[in-house]
Image (cartoon, helix red, strand yellow):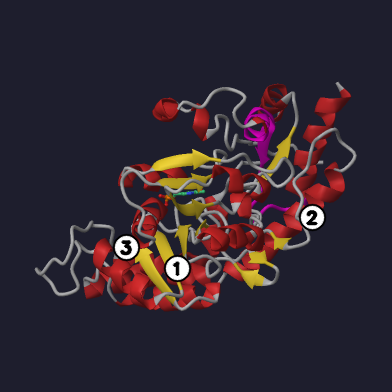
Amino acid sequence: MSHQPVPYLDLKAQIKPLRAEIDAAISKTIDNCSFCLGPDVAQFEKDFAKYCGAEHCVAFNSGTSAEHVGLMLLGVKAGDEVITTPYTFVATSWAISYIGAKPVYVDVDDVTMNLDPKLIERAITPKTKAILPVHLYGLPFDVDAIRDIGKKYGIPLMEDACQSHGAKYKGKTVGGLGEVSCFSFYPGKNLGAFGEGGALVTNNAEFAKRARSLREHGSTVRYYHDEVGFNYRMEGIQGAVLGIKLKHLAKWTSERQRVAKRYAELLKDTPLQLPSEPSYAESVWHLYVVRHPQREELKKHLEANGVGCALHYPLPLHLQKCYAELGYKQGSFPNAEKSANQCLSLPIYPELTEEQIQRVVEVVKSFFKK
Ligand SMILES: *Cc1c(COP(=O)(O)O)cnc(C)c1O
């Protein structure tokens, strides 16, 4: 058994076989001087919409900005409320706060760690203008259950799909399942740019048109501004890189699924609480998050033995200093708090070898034998 360190993430391994192709594409972008938006971004938008099974994709300079514009499209205004999850990366709530609206948190399900549909209805008020759940760690939330509640009250759904490129809900790819869906192409995501990037995906042509305007200073005709907009454009070079990487995404996803399957087989007899997929969902395994009460000790043990790991996420949003004014307390959302205290992310990426998986498992098991 090899005792080579296993890095938590290894982007170099992903880039190496594509390097020549990507270098050529970047060179072409430089030759064309198409640095902001441009033909490569336009082509990527077409390809990514198709990948999601949706009509329109509008590329952004980050997932956060796509979400900001997404909530504006849904008509969320200052003083409104948006129902969302306290257990996610903080950017999910930024869009709500940027508008001056209020995040209203609802606890997650203990098994899936996604927004619990059973708890949503009692959080709805006349001010609720959108529901914003996250397909967390690559696992789709229960789209139908949540959409049905929204329909009953006339509240639209925005999917935060930033961690879930290509994930499937009842056989359908996420991204076209809400009124609006947002993706991130931050380098560590399943589909990552060479810098920042994001996208808004929708089947609504009016939304797509307004999103294009809002990302570009509120204008469709240069130097004529219909509304106050933003500079949220995707860079040309990112469009070129993403276009090449998208062709490999399906293969990368099945490699991630291979790793998850091996972890499930090899770790099933340990005391860890392992992630699982409900029958309606096919995860793309952005992260492989196990849970255990001795998470801190286990993390130290893994690191001492050269196995990289990480915490996603150690503090739920309702307990963050930036949201203290919302008035939530320790105990407000027990499942989110439990996950925050017990979560530990093991290495998972397409290039992770069987030998590396075995090494991770061996080190985990040696912790419980001590
Ligand atoms: C990464 C991420 C975002 C933000 O995307 P950026 O491209 O980093 O702005 C939003 N929500 C979730 C759940 C994310 O994982």
Residue 254, can we see it? Answer: yes
The image position of residue 277, as x and y in percent, is 75, 55
Q: Residue 142 in the image: state x and y as whole percent.
A: 66, 57
Residue 349 picture location, percent across and down: 63, 53
Please determine whether, in this image, residue 163 is positioned above or below residue 47: above
**Mark 1 falls on what kind of element?**
strand
Sort mark 3 into few (<14), some (14-19) or many (20+) by Cα contacts within 10 Å.
many
Q: Does the residue labelled 1 lie within 8 Å of ligand 1?
A: no
| Residue at 41% across, 64% down | 200
State if disc 3 and disc 1 touch (CB < 8 Å). Answer: no
Q: What element carries label 2?
A: helix
* Disc ID at residue 201: 1
Nearer the camera: disc 1 or disc 3: 1
Is residue 343 rendered to the left or right of residue 33? right
Query: How far from the left and from the top, in percent, is residue 241?
Result: 41, 66
Between 310 and 23, the residue placed more toward the observer is 310
Q: Does the magenta stretch include residue 175?
A: no
The mark that comes first in sequence, 2 or 3, is 3
Label 2 to label 1: alpha-carbon separation = 30 Å
The CA distance from mark 1 to mark 3 is: 14 Å
Ligand 1 within 8 Å of disc 3? The answer is no
Query: In this figure, which residue is indicated by the disc labeled 3?
Result: 234
What residue occupies the far left of the structure in this picture?
Answer: 223
In the picture of the structure, the residue carrying the numbered disc 2 is: 261
Amino acid type for the residue under numbered disc 1: Val
User: Which badge, 2 or 1, is on the more N-terminal residue?
Assistant: 1
Residue at image point 86% right, 36% down: 270
**Which amino acid type corresponds to the residue marked 3 in the rendered image?**
Met
Magenta part of the protein: which range? 335-354
Residue at screen point 57% across, 39% down: 87
